[in-house]
Amino acid sequence: MTTDIALNIVLLSFMAIVGLAIARLRNLFPVAMLTGLYSLLSASLFTLLDAVDVALTEAAVGAGVTTVLFLATFGLTRAREKPVPRSRTLIGLAVTALTGAVLVYASLDMPHFGAADTPVQEHPLRDRYLNQMSEEIDVPNAVTAVLGSYRGYDTLGEVVVVFTAGIGVLMLLGVAWHRPRKPGKREQ
Amino acid sequence: MMFLVAIIAIVVTMLMILVRALLGPTVYDRILAINLFGTKTVLFVAVLGFLNGRPEFLDLGLIYALINFIGTVTVLKFMQYGDLGWEAASKEKPDV
């Protein structure tokens, strides 16, 4: 498991480097691509932590859809960040530090990684899910069985929310009327 | 042991690609670097599956490869047309 820990450290430091680079860049076009790289890194990290379904979502949403959405937005606006006055940067730094501190404080309440005495390990429903799943649902994957059947109404609600949001965005945007720009304009 | 060496090699390559993606003088360097990084992620996930003795997650690597391809094509299309080509589609010449 030393390998896993070493890989965790390496991936997390890569993510930190990419995050700092994103914060430093002023041209937003490389930023959009670097966020794609960032989410590929976090998808690798999720795979390392055995959260394969999360990794799949992260790669599809983060690296795929978000990059496309960012680029589509740059087609409508400018791909360059406006300079921000120093005072507002300091306020932003303070808010970020405060939020980070609150999150770190909240994480102290969480059980340790791989701890045996968490609700996930001890709750009676866990045995039910893991042992009777094959008879009740007949799906090989426990996560799929919980999401698709035991918590089916919850998932249905989520799907409805996402669908409504998609329809709302489409109604707001309408049909794209804008003109295409001249080719070859995009250079660093 | 073999997979361990492989994953160390992949991580080292990732580091080198990361340097290129961050320094990259032109935007094409970055595009190439990020495309390569996606490929390295595919390899990373694949080797990690074998390293942990659970190679069932190889299809995750396949999905990553597909997403990586879509991302690169989008970026290049945006570079070419300055747009994702809604209206330009009717005017432009076919690719082949």
Image (spheres, coloured by chain):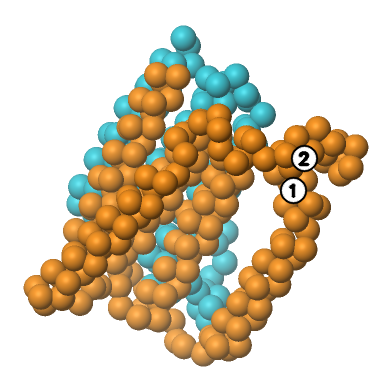
Q: Quadrant of the rendered structure where residue A88 is?
A: bottom left
Q: In this rendering, would A179 be left or right of A154?
A: left
Residue B14, by quadrant, is top left
> Chain B is shown in which shade?
cyan
Chain of the residue where label 2 is placed in the rendered structure: A
> How busy is the neighbourhood of tag 1: few (under 14 within 10 Å), some, or many (20 plus)?
some
> Chain letter for orange?
A
For label 1, the SS is helix
Give the distance between the C-alpha atoms of the residues marked 1 and 2, in whole angstroms: 8 Å
Task: Check contact, mark 1 vs mark 2: CB within 8 A.
Answer: yes
In this rendering, position of residue A65 left or right of residue A91:
right
> How busy is the neighbourhood of tag 2: few (under 14 within 10 Å), some, or many (20 plus)?
some
Residue A122 appears in the picture as rendered:
yes
Residue A187 visible in the snapshot: no
Q: In which quarter of the image is the N terminus of chain A?
A: top left
- How far from the left and from the top, in percent, is residue B31? 36, 51
Residue ID at (51%, 90%): A177
Disc 2 marks which residue?
A129
Vertical placement of residue B25 versus A47, above or below:
below
Indicate the position of residue A48 as horizontal and vertical percent values: 49, 33
Task: Kindly indicate whether the residues beneath marks 1 and 2 are on one polypeptide chain.
Answer: yes
The x, y position of residue B87, in whole percent, is 53, 81
Q: Which residue is drawn at 45% across and 73% down?
A: A72
